[in-house]
Amino acid sequence: MTPPCALFVGGVRSGKSGLAQQWAEARALRRLYVATGEPADAEMAERVRRHRAARGPEWACLEEPLDVAAALDALWAGKSPTPPAAGRPGVVLLDCVSMWLANLLGAGLDDGAVLGRVDGLAASLSRRTLPVAVVTAEAGLGLVPPSPLPRRFLDLLGLANQRLARAAEPVIFVTCGLPLALRGRVPRELESRP
């Protein structure tokens, strides 16, 4: 039986990362956090520090800003992307797709290449050998930006979310810290969250 792939989608500060972490922690003691954000400035470095502190020592971390599918494929093949002392993880948390897409755009990829990477990630998720939670931002709940680059980003993020949702179950929409199942059901460990 294929391990679950849960997609957590929501707005900024909706609680999606916290719920994804709770979902992952209910599945294994050894956990791998795949981080797509890079601490390029002091504010982002502080965010990274706070996230690591909140996760705790049971979490190994792999920073992969561009080639997420290759990193996951290596993990599925049994090649550990973390130091041997960390051991093989029992669950993976990828946080987050929206930052990853921003990195790909920043690297100069065109829309076709970005969506090709998204399809590669969806394919990798279909080959998973471990439970995996994927976090992404919802693209369609705000105003249409007045300039081309943010509109392009939101268009690509919306398309990416659709493609990744097809590869996942459950798909959980998070707002106000509350989970709502879009596909499948809200996992038990998330139902009793205060």
Image (tube, rainbow, N blue to C red):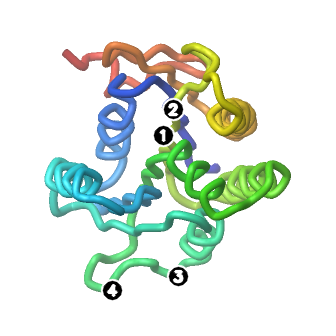
Indicate which disc, 4 or 1, sits on the residue closer to the N terminus: 4
Q: Nearer the viewer, residue 165 or 117?
A: 117
**Farthest front residue in view:** 147
| Observer-nearest of 100 and 69 | 100
Residue at the extreme bottom of the image, as rendered: 84
Q: Nearer the viewer, mark 4 or mark 1?
A: 1
Q: Residues within 10 Å of mark 4 (few under 14, many from 20)?
A: few
Q: Amino acid at mark 3?
A: Lys
Would residue 47 be found to the left or right of residue 111 on screen? left
Tag 1 secondary structure: strand
| SS at circle 2 | strand
Marks 3 and 1, the one that precedes in the sequence: 3
Mark closer to the chain start, 4 or 3: 3
Nearer mark to the viewer, of 3 and 1? 1
Q: Report x, y in % for residue 74.
A: 59, 76
Location of mark 1 (residue): 135
Residue shown at the point (39%, 27%) measured from the top left: 12
Residue kind at label 2, given as amino acid type:
Ala
Q: Which residue is mark 2?
A: 137
Label pair 3/1, CB-CB below 8 angstroms: no
The residue identified by callout 3 is 79
Residue 134 shows in the view: yes
Quarter of the image for the C terminus: give it: top left
| Residues at marks 4 and 1, CA–CA distance in whole angstroms | 26 Å
**Residue 155 in the figure: left or right of residue 78:** right
